[in-house]
Amino acid sequence: MTRNTTFKRAVCLAQKNLSGAAIACAFAVNAVASDNAAQSSEPPLGKSATAQTAARNAAVLQQLPFTEREDFASVKRGLIAPFKGDIKNAAGRIVWSLNAYEFEQADKSPDTVNPSLWRLAQLNAHAGLFKVTDRVYQVRGLDLSNMTIIESDTGLIIIDPLSFTETARAAIDLYYQHRPKKPVLAVIYSHSHADHFGGVRGVWKRRRVQGRQGGKSTRRSAYGTRGQ
Ligand SMILES: [Zn+2]
């Protein structure tokens, strides 16, 4: 992962938090895909900040109340189980890595980075299963977007099944480790960016079903549910 990728992610999440519409998400997904393809151990390349950029970023420290730390307590509210480490596909390849974001924990942001975005990235790094309120849970930080899980009397309603089958499966499995294993009854995509629907097969499994049509026995594909 490059720093650029991280900040595209941060911008995506920030826009979602602020406006309910993360218009930069698809761009960020592309960046992650290309970074994963590279899987390089080379250090990220980049230019140093110009004097003007460094000065403008430093000025932000005076413009915003960085000593106000309430958000760092709020972001842990409802935490049931933290998540750390990597998520891999069947071939053992890493598709999502929280380890790649550890550099964000440095107290002082590089002079190439707006300190407010750096702080936001640190807040976004809190990954795991959270209780939002009764019957509403969230898995955060296992992808660009968050998965929301609503518990109905008979099963689960998933809002936004993340970008990839593997991350979505890791998210629902984390939930099932701590909550009753009810079936997924419905999936809602909050909007059409890939990080909000691409992982649907991680929570909604394709299977062959037997049926009858016109008096004849038929076999066809359908989507079944996980958790049954
Ligand atoms: Zn989006």
Image (cartoon, helix red, strand yellow):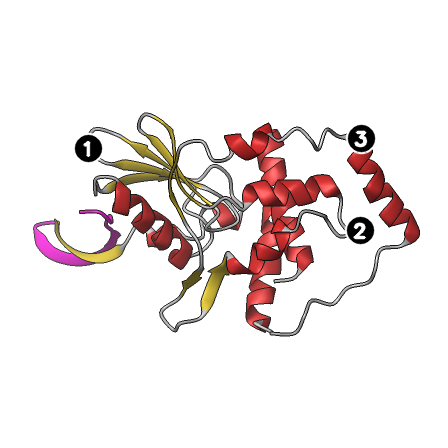
Amino acid type at circle 3 is Gln
Q: Which residue is mark 1?
A: 154
Mark 1 or mark 2: whose residue is earlier in sequence: 2
Q: Nearer the viewer, residue 83 or 191?
A: 83
Amino acid type at circle 1 is Thr
Q: Are marks 2 and 3 in contact (CB under 8 Å)?
A: no
Marker count (numbered): 3
Q: Secondary structure at mark 3?
A: helix
Q: Is residue 191 visible?
A: yes
Q: Is residue 24 visible?
A: no
121 on left or right of 135:
right
Q: What segment is highlighted magenta in the picture?
A: 214-228
Q: Which residue is mark 3?
A: 63
* Residue behind label 1 places its C-beta within 8 angstroms of ligand 1: no
Residue 47, how many percent across, how many down? 82, 63
Is the residue 66 above or below the residue 166 in the image?
A: above
Extreme-right residue of the structure? 51
Identify the residue at horizontal 7%, vertical 50% (top origin): 215
Q: Are marks 1 and 3 in contact (CB under 8 Å)?
A: no
82 on left or right of 144:
left
Q: Which residue is mark 2?
A: 111
